[in-house]
Image (cartoon, helix red, strand yellow):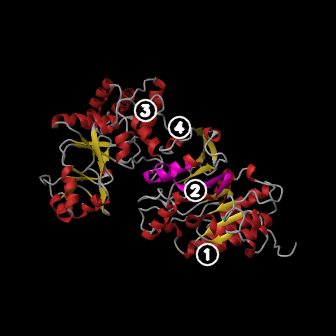
Amino acid sequence: MGPGRRRSLTSHEVDDLAAVLAADLQRVDDRRDRGVFFTPSDIAERLTALALGPTNGSTDGSTSGTVADPACGAGVFLLAAGRLLVDQGVADPATVVRRHLFGADIDPASVEATRRLLATWAGIEPGEVAGVVVGDPLHHGRDVWAGCPGGGASTGFDAVVGNPPFLGQLRASTVVSAADRKRLRYRFPGLVAAYTDVAWLFLAAGLDLLADGGRMVLIQPQSVLAARDAGPVRDLVVSTARLAGIWWDRSEVFAGHTEVCAPVVERSPCGRGPLQERPVEVFVDREVVIAGRSPEPAVGETWGGVLASVLGVPPGVPSGGETTTGGSIGTMGAVTAGFRQHFYGLVTGVVERSGPDDPRPSMVTTGSVDPLHLRWGDRLCRFDGRRWQAPVVDLDAVTAGDPEVGRWFAERRRPKLLVASQTAVVEVVVDQTGDLVPVTPLIVIEPVGRGRETDIEVLWRLAAALSAPSITALAVRRSLGAARSSGRLRLSAAQVSDLPLPTDAGAWDEGTALARTLHRSSGAPAASDTWRAFGRVMAAAYGVVDPEAVATLVDWWWSRHPASR
């Protein structure tokens, strides 16, 4: 054993050390509250293998095969990269750690933990792990590694891997300050919006770190696939690089905290060319096994469609596209949704109903909406941290607290359609009297330019269209990843407005009649057969007529439908 060399630990001992170091870091502060999650070593190894293929290795002792983790935490991804480089014959562990591995973290304790882990694995001293530094590549890019191969003014790293912190802007513990948001907007012009998760920006930062031909695999919240405010980052990836693959986790690696995925991004040395015509590979679960291939998404498209077919989501229309020639929901109704101020503006005006003669309008939450049926009064709902049996709204009190919010709700006092969120299928309920007060995030659809009698018929036609299996299939493809759970869908008002209308008017008329029947018989034993008949008719309304295609679509839709349970 030469000078400075220590006894090499076994693979299991090194993995145990990694887990201990991560646990030590966890005890220092509650990192999960700050969007920081420890990645199991087996996941890190399999994802790193997607980024660090044999073409990135070298057997001539050069510094090709450089790997960077821009938010290295306890170092589990860099350890995985080091092992792969050794297996590829790039160099011995000590040389790999000294010359090929680069990490950064804003937390000095994390940097010290990573240095200790890599040094222990390589049999060297922590002080020799020069490529792991305290710094913030999100703000300062390669400059945090000035003077190191791949850093500073060099051409970039051959691979970028890791699990950056998830900093969504809907949780107080992960919201960024106004000053930091301003700096991020300067650093990433056009990419930072109100609800941008900082994890998404690491994809943009990683692109800047990559050398031509390099690959990046960064774990992301599944929201990156479909969230509106992630759109600019998605477009940056597919317009300046190639989406080579996506890992979609169904094994709940971070169960109870968040659902994750990992785009595999390749920086083509020739820009977007023949390489971009190759399909996107889809990997799934803890084993990171390939499940299928899909066409690459275009600029402006969500990435849910890449996964949909592989995950068994049938096409909603015969061509497999996402539009028809029958127009869109927005051509028949004005689609709107409330915001935070509308939710909180209701707080002072909500009370339990005093009795059956209480004239105040009913407050409706997503939990009170079932497909074509309102469960208000039958099922407890949650609002403002409380459970309610039959909540009603004193609109005068709401208006007194916030006139603008009161006016918004007053304008919704007309026949309308309410569309629920975070559901397995698209769920809507028709408000024929206009007396329902919708709570955010319910989406509201109001008929445009028609008289009252016509309004009711229009609403039922829209209800039938939105309740169709084809629409749920299209909605899942467009919103996969946007909901809190991968088994749910979440649509914005704009996405609902863009959903297509049926093209077969006769089948649509028949489906509308069945929708009314289902509304009247909701919960009855015979409703199951009626629902499936409705599904078949509305599949035809959207042009799905092949018996096998109809059966596949309706069976898939019915397996998700709450009435099937």
Mark 1 = which residue?
108
**Does 343 sit left or right of 77 as displayed?**
left
Q: Nearer the viewer, mark 4 or mark 1?
A: 1
Quadrant of the drawing holding the C terminus: top left
Mark 2 burial class by Cα count in 10 Å: few <14, some 14-19, many 20+: many
Indicate whether residue 181 is drawn in magenta. no
- Residue sitting at 32 percent across and 33 percent down? 526
The reply to whether callout 3 and callout 2 are in contact (CB within 8 Å) is no
Question: Which residue occupies the foreground of this view, 441 or 380?
Answer: 441
Which of the two discs, 2 and 4, labels the residue nearer the N terminus?
Answer: 2
Mark 2 = which residue?
219
On screen, 381 above or below 521?
below
* Amino acid beneath label 4: Ser
Which of the two discs, 3 and 1, labels the residue nearer the N terminus?
Answer: 1
SS at circle 1? helix
* Amino acid beneath label 3: Val
On screen, 218 above or below 336?
below
The reply to whether callout 3 and callout 1 are in contact (CB within 8 Å) is no
* Amino acid beneath label 2: Ile
Residue interval drawn in magenta: 210-238
The reply to whether callout 3 and callout 4 are in contact (CB within 8 Å) is no
**Residues at marks 4 and 1, CA–CA distance in whole angstroms:** 44 Å
Which of the two discs, 2 and 1, labels the residue nearer the N terminus?
Answer: 1
- Residue sitting at 72 percent across and 71 percent down? 130
Quadrant of the drawing holding the N terminus: bottom right
The x and y percentages for residue 317 are 44, 31
Mark 4 burial class by Cα count in 10 Å: few <14, some 14-19, many 20+: some
